[in-house]
Image (spheres, rainbow, N blue to C red):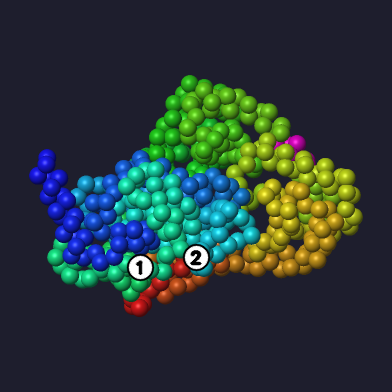
Amino acid sequence: MVREKKQENTDSEAVQSSFVVIGKKEWFQRTLLCPGKILPYCFLLSRALSGAEAVNALRPFYFAVHPDFFGQHPREREVNENSLKRLSAYLENLQKPGFKSLKPTQLVFYVRETDQNPSDGQEHFSTSGFRAVKFTLHTRDLLSTVLYILNSCSLSIEHVQSLNTNVHSQPLKEAKRTSDRPIKWDKSYYSFTGFKDPDEDLEQVWRTETTLTSWLDNNGESAVKKLKNSLPLRKELDRLKDELSHQLQLSDIRWQRSWGIAHRCSQLHSLGRLAQQNLETLKNAKGCTIIFTDRSGMSAVGHVMLGTMDVHHHWTKLFERLPSYFDLQRRLTHLEDQISYLLGGIQVVYIEELQPVLTLEEYYSLLDVFYNRLLKSRIPFHPRSLRGLQMILNSDRYAPSLHELGHFNIPVLCDPANLQWFILTKAQQARENMKKREELKVIENELMQASTKKFCLEKFYKEPSVSSIQMVDCCKRLLEQSLPYLQGMHLCISHFYSVMQDGDLCIPWNWKNGEAIK
């Protein structure tokens, strides 16, 4: 033990004397800002973080980007969900014994506003209370990864000191203001130690941009293998879905999240067992759509939501209460009609892709508050003057807006006088936007059908966060390519490159092609 400790000290002194010509304090200041360049010497000065400690250190980050806080912003929520999956996989790979190196991973997060002022001039702030942050992970240990993520999102790193007691507090406090002083190591260090120069990976990332064809070349075979392995489960999923839909006379069975095929089959088996025990109770859902989601209840549009974490007892109680939910749904429809009458015939709609998942009770409460405010103000609108237009209610805004798709975003607490002026002045623009939306939807469907036929796709779809404009642009460029890897595949248009666990190929709508760009 004494000899091992003596040898460790000798190695530390050799590294320090041979390659480090700066003070220890300054070394820490520089290293914490260049986590991609943290070298083995760091491990001689501080212990490595465990997986649990890394998760604990990233709590401020998870709190700032967690999808549950983006309920009013479905697109940003989905981007964060996808990025968290990729980050989780990256962190897991870092902890695998014997890993050599990881490919640089580019991530995008929408970060909720904090009291701190971000120092990165490239971060974009929005009026919705969050900002977009983009960074590339190229780290080789949990400590440097944690520090890099927190710094990239302009979050405090002082709490990391309590997890790594050998890291001095002063360098942590000064880390952000010394970001313009990256440490440079002589190439002889890597020749002598055998460690890989991290600059080589960074240069490769900057020099080469992922293209669609190169990504398919590298991942096509893996996707084909996963898809082939999933085919038996896919058939089982279709069989279970058809049987339950017929048995319970359902309109459809859907899933709110992109769970794997095996997980979905398990959920249907669970519902099937409940149907065997309480068939008559479950028949209350006749004509409804069942959605497996995070919580049980009835959605704002009348879908039966089954929380995947709930037990059969909760599901049974929900099916028993469905008649009372149907009564509330009728009252909600009447309330929408009354609001429409007071606002000149404008239609009140709930768009699942653009609004947070609300229960029927929550949505009724919003409508009721808005209706009572309209009754008190008595805004003069000519009857039926706004027929053909649409509006959705929002609870997180105070000023009305017109969406590019043509519908009005109306805050529940909007000032009635401002509401009248805004709707009347924007009515014509709203009609034009709605017309463009319908035309664009037709073009989108035609291009998706053409793409499916040309590439012989088994399935072609997009994530809800991808707009019709983005999808049209994507399909037009796809049709100009020759992509044999896509034959028989399930292709999803998303914001990132990824191969799903069941073989679905996900490509970003703004994919690039051609030669590598320097």
Q: Depth check: give the residue in front, 264 or 108.
A: 108
Indicate the position of residue 400 as horizontal and vertical percent values.
74, 57
Say left or right for 319 vs 28. Answer: right
Res 377 seen here: yes
Indicate the position of residue 322 as horizontal and vertical percent values.
63, 29
| Image quadrant in which you'd find residue 19 | bottom left
Question: What amino acid does circle 1 point to?
Answer: Pro
Q: Are marks 2 and 1 in contact (CB under 8 Å)?
A: no
Give the number of the disc on residue 182: 1
Distance of mark 2 from mark 1, alpha carbons? 16 Å
Q: Depth check: give the residue in front, 378 or 89.
A: 89
Res 89 seen here: no
Question: What amino acid does circle 2 point to?
Answer: Asp
Say which residue appears at 81% left-offset and 53% top-offset: 415
| Pointer 2 residue | 120
Give, as a single range, the part of the protein colored magenta: 329-335
